[in-house]
Amino acid sequence: MRWHYNLVNQGGGPLVRDCDIYAASGLIAGEALTCIDGANRAMLQAPSGATVPDFAGVLLETPTNQASAVASGTLYSAKVCLNPDAIYIAEYETTDKLDVVSSTSTAVTFSGASIDANVEGGWLYASAGTGIGQLAFVGAATTTILTIDTTQAYAVTPDATTDMILVRAPWSGNVDLGTSYTQCKTIGASTGLIMCLENYIQSTFVPFGPLRPRQHHMLTGLNTAAVQLYSDLYFYGSVFNQSARYY
């Protein structure tokens, strides 16, 4: 995850500050950082879960020293982007996928996925199994069935061997982050405090740009073209939006 632009001050760059951090180990560049109550509250830390409450900023470097100690006054710092209005661009992780139960050439069923509301306008990418490499625009949705853009059916119908990545629709306000807190999570039901503002694609034969149905619906062979899918993210669960948090 990295700074992409500012929502308000679009002519300015990222606001970068040296901030005290805490972790036993594992903090990496591109990771979301939060404020967590407790003995180490004076330092920014990794989120307490995928929903990322009390977001503060994004780590811009992988720090050599991370284990600050309040008791001895041993504090380590690292560069963090702190813009309250920053929009960050994050890739979708590929390790966590939706498992297909069954499919027609126009609709995919997921069992127990409990897909949350308002995923129409998102995208389904077949990342493994039958039909791998196909990208489809989601035209209609229930909590278990996603129906694709009616202008073109799947070239190869997915089946129970297929894994899917669900790219959230713009203005979806419940994106989760993956376990590294650097990428978007693609679980069926998300409850995070993060809004998706725009989606993007990039591959060896598709230049980086916003995802658009009439350009990108039913692209095939993306698995052999180093495809990457991204979302612009706004963290509305930011500590900067909660002025009464510590009072």
Image: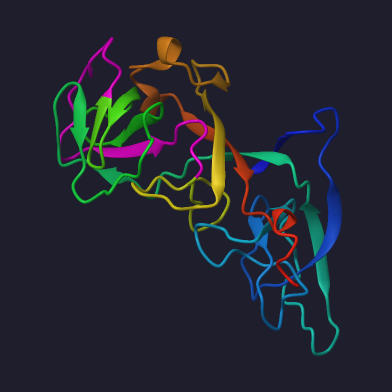
* Residue occupying the point 47% across, 16% down: 212
Q: Which of 65 and 175 is in front in this view?
A: 175
- Position of residue 149 relative to residue 109, above or below, is above
- Is 28 magenta? The answer is no
Where, quadrant-wise, is the C terminus in this rendering?
bottom right
Q: Which residue lies furthest to the bottom in this view?
A: 71
* Residue occupying the point 23% across, 19% down: 154
Q: Is residue 8 left or right of residue 196?
A: right
- Position of residue 188 relative to residue 26, above or below, is above
Q: Can residue 130 be seen in this view?
A: no
Q: Is residue 41 left or right of residue 154?
A: right
Q: Nearer the viewer, residue 179 or 168?
A: 168
* Residue occupying the point 65% across, 63% down: 27
- The segment highlighted magenta reads 148-173
Where, quadrant-wise, is the N terminus in this rendering?
top right
Residue 118: quadrant of the picture = top left
